Image (cartoon, rainbow, N blue to C red):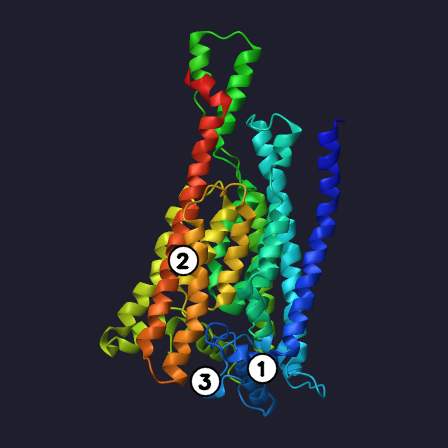
Amino acid sequence: MTKDDGEMVEEQKKKPCRFWIWALSSVLFRLILISYAGNLNLSSRPEVSTPLTSIRRLAEGYWLKQASMSPYAGSMYHGSPLLLSLLGPLTVQRIKGQPSHLFCSLVFVIADILSAILLRGIGKKLQMAYGLNARLLGLLKSPRDKAGILPCGDIAALVYLWNPFTIVCCVGLSTSPIENLAVILALNGAVTRRVPLAAFGLVMATHLSLYPAILTIPVIFLLGYGLDAPPLKLFLQTRNVESGNRSSTSSASKQAKSKPTAQLPFLWKTVVHFVFWALVWSLCVMVLCRLSLSKHGGLEEMFKRTYGFILSIEDLSPNIGVFWYFFAEVFDFFRNFFLIVFHVNILFMLLPLAIRLKHRPCFLAFIYLAISSLLKSYPSVGDSALYLSLWALFVNELADMKFSFFLFCGYLGVSLLSPVMHNLWIWRGTGNANFYFGNAIGYACFQIVFVVESVSAMLNHDRALKKCNPNHQKVKN
């Protein structure tokens, strides 16, 4: 072993220790902020708490339930009855001299840590797959090339833990950490091929916020095709060239070998297993919700007050999305038409992206989450925290992404201007709704550019692999 190899081994041993130091530091930082949560007043910020994620609304729903009333009475609470049963008792627990809802804050801290650990597991699997694919394509020729692969799992986990969006959601008593945990649990189960876990995470994420239902497509691709990889044609060309070098070939046999006729096998048995477990978990969730609301309208009331509330956009209180302003201005005669247009807009993007990115299902899940964060009825910064951490899983592939600094400055500027514009409009009275809506429009534009450039960078990476692959040049010649 050379001196350089020994230094690389020592560096690899130090990385796990560094990760846990940074992770524990993020927990300590959260606990410090939680002790001053009353002064920060983050739970009232529209960027953090929405009608679906506000702990204050959840506490109101629990109070109504304790008073033998429907938790959905009064149009305050619109979340899951299971989440109400889990967090509701914690909202009434008090410790003298400590901030209110302290136990809920600790639950959200634990949820963030679990999400980071699961993200790290996803990243390790993707990193191993990236190294294996690069070696099969002949792109890793020395140990130093392998050392150049960034630890995407550690990076993604730390991006999630130290992202200001994640921190303010945790300290601001938003239920977004629970929803993000369910989504990451589904992806982790699919990546590690733990089918019951993947089905449970997807069912719970859909139950909590509806929009993660679109992740069914990338989860099925993960279970059917496997982890993210370059296009299949590159591997077929590599295999054909290697087999051609080992045997004497005629011109006819060379022509036959240069045609990639094989297809990537799809594991239907695993997908059927996933569908079975998804139905089982869905049935369990429905039964528990039925028992929880047996005296308050049952499942019909729950569907109307949760999913119906999301789709009909009844609450037009300001948030960082664009729906609230648009539907406050639109004529009632056209309201149903535009509701259909806005919601179907997400569905129109699913199929084209699935066809183009089916060889990269984890990246497809990231794109789906970014699009749903942009077009959902009641978005919060917790949604952005989730897809930004998933983006960090692909730092090796997206290293040459354009406009990175521009997007960073844009996200930072919008984050700083949003509370300023809200204060000018609501509290000082020197502005109007256009101030805050203009900031929301800018935020939406930056998200659009971010999604477009991410997809473009990934496709350019695949093209670059094709050009760098030495076996591709042999096939071409």
Amino acid type of the residue tagged 1 in the rendering: Asn
Question: Do the CB atoms of the residues marked 2 and 3 lie less than 8 Å apart?
Answer: no
Q: Residue at x 51, y 18 (%)?
A: 241
Residue at the image position 50 percent from the left and 42 percent from the top: 399
* Res. 447 mark: 2
Pick the front one: 342 or 425: 425
Q: Nearer the viewer, residue 102 or 41?
A: 41
Return the disc, 2 or 1, that comes first in the chain's sequence.
Answer: 1
Q: Quadrant of the N terminus?
A: top right
**Callout 2 environment at 10 Å: few (<14), some (14 to 19), or many (20+)?**
many
In x, y percent, where is residue 337?
Answer: 27, 69
Upstream in sequence: badge 3 or badge 1: 1
Rendered image: mark on residue 75:
3
Q: What is the C-alpha distance between the residues marked 2 and 1? A: 31 Å
Amino acid type for the residue under numbered disc 3 = Ser
Vertical order, 386 against 326 (above or below) = above
Q: CA distance from mark 3 to mark 1?
A: 28 Å
Quarter of the rendering containing residue 24: bottom right
Q: Nearer the viewer, mark 2 or mark 3?
A: 2
Q: Position of residue 206 (x, y in %)?
A: 51, 64
Crowd around label 1: few <14 · some 14–19 · many ≥20 (10 Å)? few
Residue 70 is situated, as x and y percent measured from the top left of the image, at 53, 87
Mark 2 to mark 3: distance in Å?
A: 31 Å
Q: Quadrant of residue 199?
A: bottom right
Whether residue 189 appears in this view of the structure is no
First reached walking from the N terminus: tag 2 or tag 3: 3
Instruction: Kindly report which numbered mark, 2 or 1, lies closer to the viewer in this rendering.
Output: 1
Q: Name the residue that disc number 1 marks.
A: 39
Contact (Cβ within 8 Å) of mark 3 with mark 1: no
- CA neighbours of label 3 inside 10 A, class few (<14), some (14 to 19), many (20+): some
Q: Amino acid at mark 2?
A: Gln
Residue 422, position as x, y percentages in the image: 40, 77
